[in-house]
Image (tube, grey):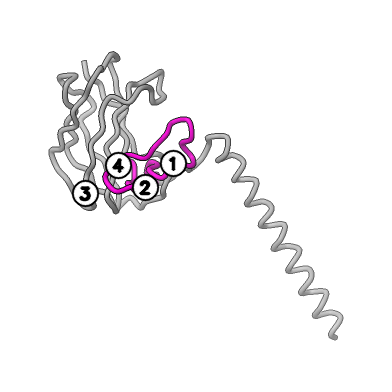
């Protein structure tokens, strides 16, 4: 009887180890830039509302942003659907902010991408490096496995 219990325990242990090995395979995808590489937030805790078309290249108006902690509104040039050069940055406090104007500089494309990043590094200092995005402290929020970001036309 003891032998059967011991074998059952070993079987459960082997299944658990194999399950963990399967989980680590998902980590590889994240290392390749796929999947969630920022901070996961709920749909009720992190939201971004911004008009899809705006009239100007000096300011981006964010209608409403809701963040679970202090955060950053980050605006990049749209480089064929990917974030290009950063052209706007504004810190926002935890909670809801409405009618937020993000100053823009050097906008040279018809579209920009606005994203919401956590402020987890030095308080009120943007600690994000595109070259080391996955290890930077001020990474973007992800809601339902998608980055909390919007593409906006500015011309």
- Mark 3 neighbour density, 10 Å: few (under 14) some (14–19) many (20 or more): some
Q: Position of residue 31 (x, y in %)?
A: 57, 39
Q: Is 136 left, or right, of 126 in this rendering? A: right
Which secondary structure lies at badge 3?
Answer: loop
Mark 4 touches mark 1? (CB < 8 Å): no
Of tags 4 and 3, the one toward the viewer is: 4
For the residues marked 3 and 2, what is the alpha-carbon distance in whole angstroms?
Answer: 14 Å
Front one among 86 and 61: 86
Asked where in the image residue 73 lies, by quadrant, the reply is top left
For the residues marked 3 and 1, what is the alpha-carbon distance in whole angstroms?
Answer: 20 Å
Q: Which residue is outermost to the left?
A: 99
Part of the protein shown in magenta: 117-143
If you read the primary sequence from the N terminus, does the residue marked by circle 1 or circle 2 appear first?
Answer: 2
Quadrant of the rendering where the C terminus is positioned: top left
Q: Which residue is mark 2?
A: 121
For the residues marked 4 and 3, what is the alpha-carbon distance in whole angstroms?
Answer: 13 Å
Res. 93 mark: 3
Res. 125 mark: 4
If you read the primary sequence from the N terminus, does the residue marked by circle 3 or circle 1 appear first?
Answer: 3
Mark 4 touches mark 2? (CB < 8 Å): yes
Front one among 117 and 6: 117
Q: Which residue is mark 1?
A: 136
- Mark 2 neighbour density, 10 Å: few (under 14) some (14–19) many (20 or more): some
Asked where in the image residue 58 lies, by quadrant, the reply is top left
If you read the primary sequence from the N terminus, does the residue marked by circle 4 or circle 3 appear first?
Answer: 3
Q: Residue at x 29, y 15 (%)?
A: 109
């Amino acid at each position: 009887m003891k032998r059967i219990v011991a074998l059952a325990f070993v079987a459960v242990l082997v299944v658990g180890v194999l399950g963990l090995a399967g989980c680590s395979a998902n980590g590889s995808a994240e290392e390749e830039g796929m999947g969630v590489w920022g901070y996961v937030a709920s749909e009720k805790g992190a939201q971004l509302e911004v008009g899809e078309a705006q009239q100007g290249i000096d300011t981006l108006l964010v209608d409403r942003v809701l963040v679970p902690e202090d955060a950053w509104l980050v605006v990049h040039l749209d480089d064929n659907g990917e974030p290009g050069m950063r052209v706007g940055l504004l810190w926002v406090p935890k909670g809801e902010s409405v009618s937020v104007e993000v100053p823009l500089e050097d906008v040279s494309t018809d579209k920009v991408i606005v994203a919401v990043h956590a402020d987890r590094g030095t308080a009120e200092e943007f600690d994000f490096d595109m070259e080391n995005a996955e290890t930077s402290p001020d990474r973007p929020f992800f809601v339902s496995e998608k980055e909390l970001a919007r593409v906006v036309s500015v011309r």
